Image: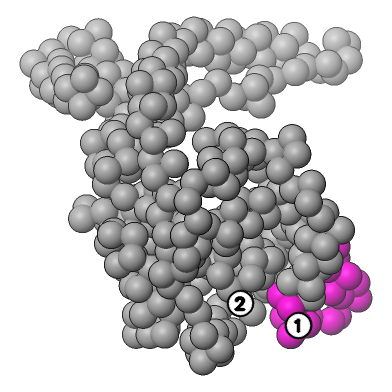
């Protein structure tokens, strides 16, 4: 339906502009319809140009390790890997062929022990498999288009002019009238966009609601894939350690502030080499302090209970010391690039945990 409506808007706009070129109303209506069609046009995903990007020739040991995890999960391995300053591991799609990119958040990578990294990667790859309804091309592109279109035509409160100058000033009446006219035109255009904006938001919510059962099923299947790949204990531990997102990001922010030079003449391009090691030690201390109360009031408690009640599974994929050393050597340069980005942009606030995450 979304694709047909978008095509109908585009064809109608072209028809009104071409046929009614000698009139005024028809071309203006055609331009308005063309703007709506462009707002909900299909978006082709792209790689984030601000993140370090790795391909197989850049990190063969890492991609061999990811290929083994993907084979165990029965999914396609990622074509690229990007490193970010977030506490997450996700899979994105880019290009017309919807190639897969694994976005590895280095705070999570540093906080997790090696076997929990296997569980997190296996969960991300299995969750983004084509059998997940929201990962399929049609549904995923429609959701991205509706979200982007709704954001494009969203009202902008900063577009209004407030005139509070002295009314006795020279030309004050003319400036006040111009400000009122500008605000009236802005409100009128917002009223015109209320219906399409509401239609886009309602359609996106409807699509999310319709795919909710499939999403929950895909989430549980991804948990099972993580347990098969990294063992049940590692999958449960990886779920429990999701609650470390906020304290880990707070500690990373503190370390960035501590490392960032205060003198204007000094450069912030030489951060401490042990940044991620210190963050890993902090995660270990938090894990020890938390003890056995990890699942209390956690949004992942039901999934942890389900994995704990299921038959215990051993790890089908492990990481030996040689692989860890090779992967660490390949990631050393991109890790420094991410720290440089954190020094420049700061540490983003971690998202609130959700049940379907």
Looking at the image, is 101 positioned above or below residue 353? Answer: below
Q: Nearer the viewer, residue 246 or 286?
A: 286
Q: Which residue is mark 2?
A: 335
Tell me if mark 2 has few (under 14), some (14-19) or many (20+) residues whose alpha carbon lies within 10 angstroms of its own: many
Q: x%, y% of residue 120?
A: 52, 59
Give the image location of residue 183, x and y in percent: 61, 13
Disc number placed over residue 112 in the picture, else none: none
Secondary structure under tag 2 reads helix
Q: Which residue is located at x 88 percent, y 11 percent?
A: 168
Work out whether 290 lies above or below 275: above
In x, y percent, where is residue 353? 65, 39
Specify the quadrant that holds the N terminus: top left
Residue occupying the point 20% across, 27% down: 3
- At mark 1, the secondary structure is loop
Image x and y of residue 151, in percent = 48, 29
Q: Quadrant of residue 267?
A: bottom right
Which residue, as the protein is rendered here, is positioned at the far right? 263
Provide the residue span drawn in magenta.
253-277
Disc 1: which residue: 274
């Amino acid at each position: 339906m979304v694709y047909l409506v978008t095509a109908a808007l585009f064809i109608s706009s072209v028809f009104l502009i071409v046929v009614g070129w000698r009139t005024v109303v028809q071309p203006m209506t055609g331009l308005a319809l063309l703007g709506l069609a462009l707002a909900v046009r299909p978006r082709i995903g792209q790689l984030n140009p601000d993140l370090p990007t790795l391909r197989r020739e850049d990190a063969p040991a890492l991609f061999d390790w990811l290929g083994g995890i993907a084979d165990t999960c029965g999914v396609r391995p990622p074509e690229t890997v990007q490193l970010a300053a977030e506490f997450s591991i996700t899979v994105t799609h880019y290009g017309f062929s919807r190639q897969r990119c694994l976005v590895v958040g280095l705070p999570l990578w540093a906080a997790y022990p090696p076997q929990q990294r296997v569980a997190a990667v296996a969960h991300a790859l299995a969750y983004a498999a084509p059998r997940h309804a929201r990962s399929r091309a049609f549904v995923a592109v429609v959701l991205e288009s509706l979200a982007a279109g709704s954001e494009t035509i969203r009202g902008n409160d900063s577009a209004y002019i407030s005139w509070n100058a002295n009314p006795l000033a020279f030309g004050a009446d003319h400036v006040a009238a111009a400000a009122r006219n500008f605000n009236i035109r802005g409100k009128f255009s917002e009223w015109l966009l209320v219906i399409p904006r509401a239609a886009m938001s309602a359609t996106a919510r409807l699509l999310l609601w319709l795919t909710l059962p499939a999403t929950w099923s895909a989430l549980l299947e991804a948990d099972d894939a993580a347990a098969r790949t990294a063992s049940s204990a590692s999958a449960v531990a990886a779920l429990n350690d999701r609650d470390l997102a906020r304290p880990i990001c707070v500690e990373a922010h503190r370390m960035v502030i501590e490392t960032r030079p205060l003198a204007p003449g000094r450069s912030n391009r030489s951060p401490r080499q042990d940044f991620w090691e210190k963050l890993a030690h902090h995660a270990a201390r938090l894990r020890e302090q938390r003890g056995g109360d990890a699942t209390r009031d956690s949004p992942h408690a039901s999934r942890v209970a389900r994995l704990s009640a299921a038959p215990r599974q051993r790890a089908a994929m492990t990481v030996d010391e040689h692989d860890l050393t090779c992967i660490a050597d390949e990631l050393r340069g991109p890790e420094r690039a991410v720290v440089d980005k954190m020094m420049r942009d700061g540490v983003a606030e971690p998202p609130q945990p959700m049940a379907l995450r």
